[in-house]
Image: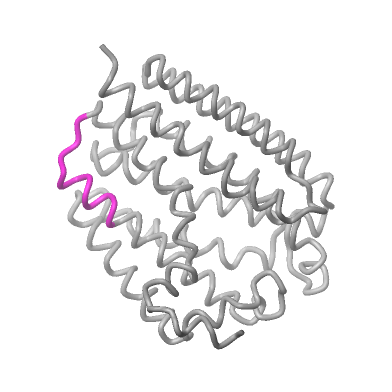
C-alpha cells in the first residue's frame, strides 16, 4: 500500500502532498481584498500575477511544512503516508522553485510587493517550526494565511496605509487560529507523546474548543468591520450571515471523538466561509444596481 502513491502522475501526487484543495481557504480572501482595493476593477495582468504569487507561495509553504515535519509525520497515523507521495529531494526542488516564482510574481506586481516578499517568505515558513517551542503555533498559521489579503491589497493599491485590509487580515488570523485549534484536537495525544507544543496538548481539548469559539466570534466581528469600512452592500451582508451560521454550525458538529466530524468542520464548513465572502463581494460589485 505504501508503494501505491508513486504510480500516480507527479502533479497529482504533488497536489495531495501540499493538499492543494485547501487553497480554497486563503485564496478567496486574497481575491476579496483585491476586489475591494480596486473597487471591483482590476486588470487581468494584476489578477494573473496575484494568482501566481498566491499559488506559488502556498505551495512553497506547504512543501516546507512537510519537509520540516518529515520524520514526525511518519510516526503519526493520520499523516504516515505523506512521505510516500513525493521524494524528499523533489519536495526541496518544488519548494525552491516556488519561492523563486512567488518573488518574481511579487516583483511583477509593484515595488512594494517585491520589497515585502522577504517578509512574506518568513511568515509562510516560520509557522512550520513553531510547534516545537510554543503552544500558539495555530496563531502563526493564521498569520501566514493573512498574507494573502494584505499582499493582494498591496498589489492593487501599492500601499498599506489604509486600515480596511487590516480588519480583514485580523479576521482571517482569528478564523484560522480557531479552526486549526479544532483540527489540532485530533493530534493532542500524539503531540503529548512526542513532546510537541500545541494548544490542545498543553491545555486540553475543552479549553481548545472554548478558545476556538471565542476566536470565531472575534473573526465574525472582523468580517463585519471590514464590510462596513469597505462600504459593501446587501450581498456582502447576506454572505456575512451565511458565514456566521457556518461558524456556529462548525462548533455544533465538531467532536474530537469523531474524526469524520472534525474533517467536515475543517474543510467543508471553512470552505463555505471563505467562498461565501468572495461570492458576496463579487455580487456586490457586479450585480448591485
- Given residues 152 and 86, the one toward you in this image is 86
* Residue at 29% in and 33% down: 35
Q: Position of residue 145 (x, y in %)?
A: 48, 50
Q: Position of residue 57 (x, y in %)?
A: 37, 60
Q: Position of residue 226 (x, y in %)?
A: 45, 25
- Given residues 154 and 263, the one toward you in this image is 263
150 left or right of 142?
left
Quadrant position of the C terminus in the picture: top left
Quadrant position of the N terminus in the picture: bottom right
Instruction: Say above or below: 169 vs 68.
Output: above
Magenta residues? 41-52
Outermost top residue: 289
Instruction: Say above or below: 12 vs 46.
Output: below
* Residue at 51% in and 43% down: 271
253 left or right of 164?
right
Residue 43 colored in magenta in the image: yes
* Residue at 23% in and 58% down: 105
Main secondary structure along the magenta-highlighted residues: helix
Instruction: Say above or below: 37 vs 106.
Output: above
Residue 169 colored in magenta in the image: no
Q: How many marks?
A: 0
Q: Position of residue 128 (x, y in %)?
A: 56, 66
- Given residues 263 and 38, the one toward you in this image is 263
Which corner quadrant of the image does residue 15 belong to?
bottom left
* Residue at 62% in and 30% down: 218
Q: How is the image coloured?
A: one colour
Amino acid at each position: 500500500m505504501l508503494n501505491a502513491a508513486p504510480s500516480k502522475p507527479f502533479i497529482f501526487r504533488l497536489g495531495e502532498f501540499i493538499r492543494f484543495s485547501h487553497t480554497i481557504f486563503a485564496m478567496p480572501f486574497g481575491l476579496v481584498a483585491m476586489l475591494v482595493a480596486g473597487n471591483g476593477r482590476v486588470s487581468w495582468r494584476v489578477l494573473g500575477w496575484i494568482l501566481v504569487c498566491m499559488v506559488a507561495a502556498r505551495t512553497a509553504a506547504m512543501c516546507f511544512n512537510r519537509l520540516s515535519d518529515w520524520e514526525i509525520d511518519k510516526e503519526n497515523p493520520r499523516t504516515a503516508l505523506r512521505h510516500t507521495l513525493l521524494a524528499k529531494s523533489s519536495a526541496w526542488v518544488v519548494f525552491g522553485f516556488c519561492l523563486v516564482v512567488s518573488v518574481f510574481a511579487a516583483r511583477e506586481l509593484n515595488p512594494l510587493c517585491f520589497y515585502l516578499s522577504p517578509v512574506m517568505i518568513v511568515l509562510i515558513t516560520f509557522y512550520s517550526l513553531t510547534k516545537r517551542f510554543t503552544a500558539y503555533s495555530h496563531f502563526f498559521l493564521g498569520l501566514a494565511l493573512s498574507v494573502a489579503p494584505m499582499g493582494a491589497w498591496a498589489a492593487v493599491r501599492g500601499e498599506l496605509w489604509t486600515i480596511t485590509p487590516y480588519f480583514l487580515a485580523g479576521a482571517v488570523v482569528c478564523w484560522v487560529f480557531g479552526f486549526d485549534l479544532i483540527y489540532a484536537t485530533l493530534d493532542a495525544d500524539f503531540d503529548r507523546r512526542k513532546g510537541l507544543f500545541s494548544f490542545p496538548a498543553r491545555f486540553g481539548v475543552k479549553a481548545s474548543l472554548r478558545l476556538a469559539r471565542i476566536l470565531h466570534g472575534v473573526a465574525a466581528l472582523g468580517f463585519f468591520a471590514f464590510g462596513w469600512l469597505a462600504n459593501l452592500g446587501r450581498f456582502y451582508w447576506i454572505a456575512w450571515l451565511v458565514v456566521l451560521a457556518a461558524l456556529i454550525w462548525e462548533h455544533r458538529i465538531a467532536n474530537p471523538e469523531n474524526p469524520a466530524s472534525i474533517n467536515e468542520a475543517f474543510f467543508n464548513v471553512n470552505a463555505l466561509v471563505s467562498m461565501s465572502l468572495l461570492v458576496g463581494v463579487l455580487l456586490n460589485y457586479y450585480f448591485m444596481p
